[in-house]
Image (tube, rainbow, N blue to C red):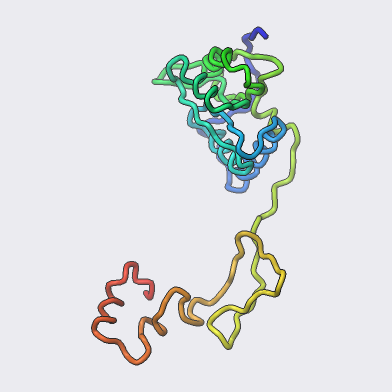
Amino acid sequence: MAADERDVPGARGSGPDDVLSHKQLLNRGDLAGEALTRLGVGPGDPVAVLLPMCLESVVVTLACVQLGAVRQTLPVGAEPGCVRSRIGSGGARVVITADNCVVDGRAYGLKTALDRELRHCPQVHSVLVVSHRPGPVSWNPGRDRWWHDALTAEMRTARPYAGAMSTRQPDPASSRPAERPEGTDLGLAALVFEDPLAGRSRDDSDEGWGDPAGGASAAELARFLSEKPPHHI
């Protein structure tokens, strides 16, 4: 299908003034993961990424990690044939790129250069385009889609925190925390609020603050002082 040249009014892109909180970044990664899922990307599938340094590049990485997909980074401004060779050998069917960028201080039509390479990559069925810099953009209707449109196609609520707060109480008769009830799942990252001074460190064979039972020999004191890092202090 022949490509046409068009400008994109109102497209939202990444720039130096874009700032996201950690929560917003994770949510953006979730949206990108859902967009890739709708394009058929699953665990182990390659996703070709031809992007300059921008916020969306980080978001793509988060999405690939979430899906178990493989990010295939392509070089910006590479010699002709390099991009098509890597896409062909990697087997990617989805490519993420930007409309325009700057290479060596000069404006560079990244999407236009990619389209020349994709003429030799018939397996690519979807191209997501990040609006990065103003300028003309080559376009293939039916295959190409704006990144921001793909992410806002189905808005969702942010995912809940994967971990959990621990409700375990310290066992006063032991330096070890009480075991949680059978069948209780605290998630992947449980937060345990224990008093570090209530008992001996779990990775320490010393009694109390570096004093072994029965007194310390000169060799034991030397070992205590030479510990790196000195975790008793």
Extreme-front residue of the structure: 89
Toward which corner of the image does residue 13 lie, by quadrant?
Answer: top right
Image vertical order of residue 231 relative to residue 21, above or below: below
Q: Nearer the viewer, residue 13 or 218?
A: 218
Extreme-bottom residue of the structure: 214
Toward which corner of the image does residue 167 lie, by quadrant?
Answer: bottom right
Q: Would you say 78 lies left or right of 57 here? A: left
The residue sitting at 69% across, 49% down in the picture is 159
Query: Where's residue 120, x and y in %?
Result: 56, 14
Q: Would you say 173 lies left or right of 41 here? A: left
Q: Quadrant of the N terminus?
A: top right
The residue sitting at 39% across, 81% down in the picture is 206
The answer to whether any part of residue 136 appears in the image is no
The residue sitting at 59% across, 86% down in the picture is 172
The answer to whether any part of residue 163 appears in the image is yes
Query: Where's residue 171, x and y in %?
Result: 60, 83
Q: How many marks?
A: 0
Q: Nearer the viewer, residue 21 or 84?
A: 84
Q: Would you say 35 lies left or right of 189 here? A: right
